[in-house]
Image: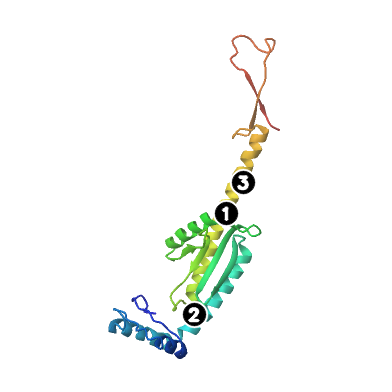
Amino acid sequence: MGNGHPVAAVITTPEISKSFKDTGIEYFNTYGGNPVSCAVAKSVMEVLERENLRDHAIRVGNYLLNSLRQLMLKHNIIGDVRGIGLFIGIELVLDRVKRTPATAEAQHIVSRMKEEHILLSSDGPDRNVLKLKPPMVFSIANADKFVVTLDLILEEIHNCEVINSSKRIITERRKKSNVGDSGVDIKKTKITDQETDINRPFTDVIQVND
C-alpha cells in the first residue's frame, strides 16, 4: 500500500463502521493519520489507478502461469503451479504421485537464481514451493526471462541427477559382479604347488572379463 513505506488502513462498510461507533467505544492510535504516510499511500493509489496496474498484474500473471504450466509438461519435478495475479507458487516434488517434497532442489534453485540476478524465495511447510511476488510493474519480458532461466536451472538439475544415477547403477553392477574400477574381475583362487614355485609371490589370479 505504501510501496515500502510503513502504512496501513482499515477498510469496511458504512454499516459495520456505524455499528462500532454505536458501541460508544472511541478508537485511538498514536500514529493514526500520519500526514507523510497518508501522502505516500495517496500517491501509490494514484499510480495504481493511472497506470492500470491491477489489470496489468492480472494479464502478466496469467501469461506467467500459462508459461510455467507449459514448463511443467517438460519437467516432472514441477508438481503444481498455482496463483492469482502476480502471486504465484511453483511446487517442486520428487514424485508427483507421492508428492514427496523436493526441498533441497528448491533451495538450490533459489541460490542459482541469485546468480542470474533473479530474487525469489521458497515457502510452505517443507520449503519446496518457489514463491513469486514481483512488483506490479513486472512485465512480459521479465516473465519470459524468469521462465527461460528456471528451465535452464531445471535442466542442470536433471542432467546432474542422470549422471549421479548412472554412477550409482555402475557402482551397484560392479559390486554385484565384484568388478573393480578398471573393469577387471578379481577372484581369489588357491594356487597349488604344481602351478607355481616357492619364489612366486602371487596368491591371486586376475581374470579379465570377456
For the point 49% across and 63% down, which residue is it? 123
**Vertical relation: 173 (above or below) 106:** above
Q: Could you say whether the residue bearing mark 1 is in a helix, strand or loop?
A: helix
Using the image as rendered, state which of residue 88 and residue 51 is in the foreground: 88
For the point 45% across and 58% down, which residue is it? 111
Is residue 149 in view? no
- The residue to which callout 3 is attached is 166
Using the image as rendered, state which of residue 160 and residue 105 is in the foreground: 105
- The residue to which callout 2 is attached is 57
User: Counting residues from the N terminus, which is met first, the one under dot 1 or under dot 2?
Assistant: 2
Amino acid at the residue labelled 1? Asn
**Residue 193 x, y percent position in the rendering:** 67, 10
Amino acid at the residue labelled 2? Ala
**Residue 26 x, y percent position in the rendering:** 34, 84
Q: Position of 73 compared to 16: left or right?
A: right
Q: Find the distance from the CA under tag 2 to the CA under tag 3.
A: 44 Å
- The residue to which callout 1 is attached is 159
Q: Find the distance from the CA under tag 3 to the CA under tag 1.
A: 11 Å
Using the image as rendered, state which of residue 180 and residue 5 is in the foreground: 5
Please tell me how crowded label 1 is: few (under 14), some (14-19), or many (20+) other residues with Cα within 10 Å: few
**Vertical relation: 85 (above or below) 201:** below
Q: Find the distance from the CA under tag 1 to the CA under tag 2.
A: 34 Å
The quadrant in which residue 5 appears is bottom left
For the point 44% across and 78% down, which residue is it? 136
For the point 35% across and 86% down, which residue is it? 42
Is residue 18 in view? yes
User: Counting residues from the N terminus, which is met first, the one under dot 3 or under dot 1?
Assistant: 1
Foreground tag (1 vs 2): 2
Q: Quadrant of the N terminus?
A: bottom left
Q: Marks 3 and 1: CB-CB under 8 Å?
A: no
